[in-house]
């Protein structure tokens, strides 16, 4: 029989795991999650997947979070914060692999960003460069999937 306490302990240390929205404490989530998969089944964009140790995590390469709250509603445990709270404290970063930094015109992230947190600044002699407005970014991840160079990453804050 699997030692669930040990599995939870090791899963807690997983790096770069995108947790679900409205989870206030990663540790409390890992301790309380029964891995019933109800959040996975109810996610309207199917971005919640079974991750390390069977724990649910978000994969923005599939789609974006619409903040529908169905993951929280489906959960039989008391792991999620109230829907009125901020879903998570995360923002995007664009790394040096961005096509515009390689003098190729691309604006797929801007087109996908509904809150208009990504804009482009004209540069003399080259394609416009991306500008991120952190105050407008809600961390939905809509810009990640359409990026042809996989240069957009989510920075996970204190959520």
Image: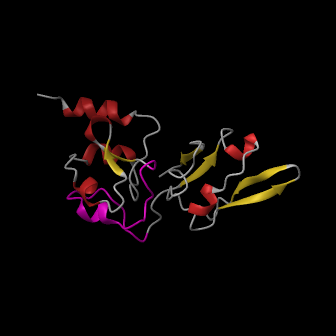
Q: Residue at x 45, y 50 (%)?
A: 60
Vertical side of 53 occupied by 111: above or below: below
- Magenta residue check for 68: yes
Q: How many marks?
A: 0
Q: In this view of the protein, which residue sits in the foreground, 89 or 67? A: 67
x and y, in percent, of residue 147 in the image: 57, 49
Q: Residue at x 30, y 65 (%)?
A: 70
x and y, in percent, of residue 115 in the image: 58, 68
Q: In this view of the protein, which residue sits in the foreground, 67 or 127? A: 127
- Magenta residue check for 94: no
x and y, in percent, of residue 143 in the image: 55, 55
Q: Residue at x 56, y 61 (%)?
A: 112
Q: State the predominant SS element of the stretch in magenta.
A: loop
Question: Which residue of the protein is positioned furthest toward the bottom in this rendering?
Answer: 84
Q: Quadrant of residue 65?
A: bottom left
Vertical side of 19 occupied by 67: above or below: below
Write down the region rendered in magenta: 60-84
Q: Residue at x 45, y 35 (%)?
A: 15
Image quarter where the N terminus lies is top left
Question: Which residue of the protein is positioned furthest toward the right in this rendering?
Answer: 124
Q: In this view of the protein, which residue sits in the foreground, 138 or 22? A: 138
x and y, in percent, of residue 136 in the image: 62, 65
Residue 156 in the figure: left or right of residue 68: right
Is the image coloured rainbow, by chain, by secondary structure, or in one colour? secondary structure
Vertical side of 22 occupied by 152: above or below: above
């Amino acid at each position: 029989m699997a030692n669930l306490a040990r599995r939870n302990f090791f899963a807690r240390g997983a790096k770069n795991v995108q947790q679900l929205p409205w989870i206030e404490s990663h540790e409390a989530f890992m301790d309380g999650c029964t891995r019933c998969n109800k959040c996975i089944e109810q996610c309207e964009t199917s971005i919640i997947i079974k991750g390390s140790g069977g724990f649910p995590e978000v994969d923005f390469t599939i789609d974006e979070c619409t903040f529908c709250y169905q993951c929280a509603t489906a959960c039989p445990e008391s792991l999620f914060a109230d829907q009125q709270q901020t879903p998570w404290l995360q923002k995007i970063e664009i790394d040096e692999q961005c096509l515009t930094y390689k003098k190729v015109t691309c604006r797929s992230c801007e087109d996908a960003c509904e809150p208009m947190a990504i804009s482009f600044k004209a540069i003399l002699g080259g394609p416009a460069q991306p500008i991120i407005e952190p105050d407008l970014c809600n961390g939905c991840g809509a810009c990640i999937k359409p990026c042809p160079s996989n240069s957009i990453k989510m920075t996970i804050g204190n959520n």
